[in-house]
Image (cartoon, rainbow, N blue to C red):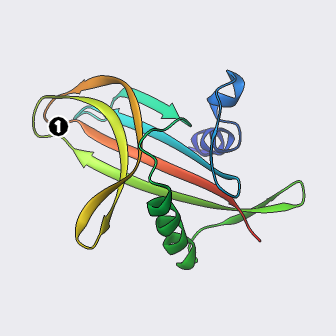
Amino acid sequence: MNKLILFGFVFLLFPLGNIFGVTQTNLGDDIFMFVQTTVRNSDGTIIVYLESTKFTNLNLPGLESFLDYETSRGNDPVITIDGEKYQIIRRIQSQSFDSERLVASTILSDNVDGKPVILARFAHDGYLTIPGDTLESIWTFVMPVS
């Protein structure tokens, strides 16, 4: 279990995208955004793992509002790297599948005035799901603390 926690923390600081030269997504004021998606079958076995720092359909005003709200809650850790302070905001979205389908993107959304609004989308090659599969997407934001 400790290895899994350490592995997750290393990915938080050094995502695979950095190793392969992928451009990171920065949202104003150097906010870094990262998503990890895991799909498991009904036995709990991982059948898909995806991660990205590249997004489409970025709704910058919506993301700013979302992050303002999340930081105001005061539940997220602040870490120091090279003397600079950063707040780490992680939110998990989960879904269970009750039918067979093809999923070709991972979406971060929020409810605004009772309506779902897309904040960001990670488009990928896709994966097939069957009833009993579950999805967990961990959205991570790293923001400088002023």
110 displayed left or right of 50: left
Label 1: which secondary element = loop
In the rendered image, which residue does mark 1 sit on?
132
- The percent position of residue 77, horizontal first and vertical second, equals 65, 66
- The percent position of residue 110, horizontal first and vertical second, equals 34, 61
The quarter of the image holding the C terminus is bottom right
Amino acid at dot 1: Gly
- The answer to which quarter of the image holds residue 115 is bottom left
Residue 27 higher or lower than 70, as above or below: above
Disc count in the image?
A: 1
- The percent position of residue 70, horizontal first and vertical second, equals 51, 70
Report the residue at 75% width, 61% height from top: 79
84 displayed left or right of 21: right
- In terms of depth relative to the viewer, which is nearer, 124 or 131? 124
Report the residue at 39% width, 36% height from top: 38
The quarter of the image holding the N terminus is top right
- In terms of depth relative to the viewer, which is nearer, 127 or 132? 127
Q: Residues within 10 Å of mark 1 (few under 14, many from 20)?
A: some
Report the residue at 64% width, 35% height from top: 15
Residue 119 higher or lower than 51, as above or below: below
